[in-house]
Image: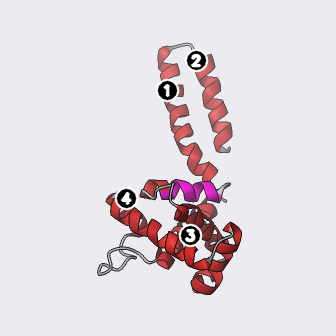
Amino acid sequence: MGILEKQVNALTRLCVAETERERAKAREELRQLLEAWPEAGQGDNPERMIRRMLLELGAPEHLTGHDYAVYAILLVAENRTYIHSITFGLYPQVAAHFDTTAARVERSIRHLVEVTWSRGDTTVLERYFGNTVSQYKGKPTNGEFIARLANVVRQRMEDAA
């Protein structure tokens, strides 16, 4: 039984419940199912998942690099070979999509990473990146940032399938 069917069943039980105890139980079950809903729905829309992760990390949406990073992470999640050719493959592809230059894409994503790393929630950053980032540099490179988030997206999509 899928999550949507479970939600409908819980809602039905809530509507037909005769006692307050039955209503409370159905309400709690529905609440839990609704909380699980975005996680299940994320596999259907990788861009939404990426945007939610960037917001959770503390990446400001108003920066140009935000949209560039979303598209770059999507490309790498779909085709892993982009991560091996960031400068001559990924950045030009993102630049072509947004009608700009590869240098601007690189600089904007670098700025996004710097701002995210300086202003973001350290516990969330630690949860996503853990020990995958050099302790000497303090923040990930553009490639490390994009690759790590693309791996998270790919894993979540596989789990949802």
Q: Is mark 2 on a helix, strand or loop?
A: loop
Q: Does the residue at mark 2 contact the one at mark 1 (Cβ under 8 Å)?
A: yes
| Tag in front: 4 or 3 | 4
Which amino acid, by three-letter code, is at mark 3?
Ala
How far is disc 2 from disc 4 in space, using C-alphas?
Answer: 45 Å
How far is disc 2 from disc 1 in space, using C-alphas?
Answer: 9 Å
Which amino acid, by three-letter code, is at mark 2?
Ala
Q: Which of 157 and 23 is in front in this view?
A: 157
Graded by Cα atoms within 10 Å as few (under 14), some (14 to 19) or many (20 or more), the crowding at tag 3 reads: many
Which quarter of the rendering shows the C terminus? bottom right
Question: Closer to the N terminus: mark 2 or mark 3?
Answer: 2
In which quarter of the view is residue 141 placed?
bottom left
| Tag in front: 2 or 3 | 3
Q: Is mark 4 on a helix, strand or loop?
A: loop
Query: Which label belongs to residue 150?
Result: 3
Q: Which residue is drawn at 65% across and 31% down?
A: 9
Tell me the residue that label 4 is attached to: 120
> Quick check: can you spot residue 148?
no
* Image-based side of 19 in relation to 42, left or right: left
Question: Mostly what secondary structure, the magenta segment?
Answer: helix
Tell me the residue that label 1 is attached to: 25
Which amino acid, by three-letter code, is at mark 1?
Lys
Question: Closer to the N terminus: mark 3 or mark 1?
Answer: 1
Instruction: Indicate the position of residue 89 as horizontal and vertical percent values.
Output: 65, 83
How far is disc 3 from disc 1 in space, using C-alphas?
Answer: 38 Å
Q: Does the residue at mark 2 contact the one at mark 3 (Cβ under 8 Å)?
A: no
| Residue at the left extreme of this rendering | 136
Span colored in magenta = 46-54
Q: Residue at x 35, y 74 (%)?
A: 131
| Tag in front: 3 or 1 | 3
Would you place residue 140 above or below residue 59 in this image?
below
Tell me the residue that label 2 is attached to: 17
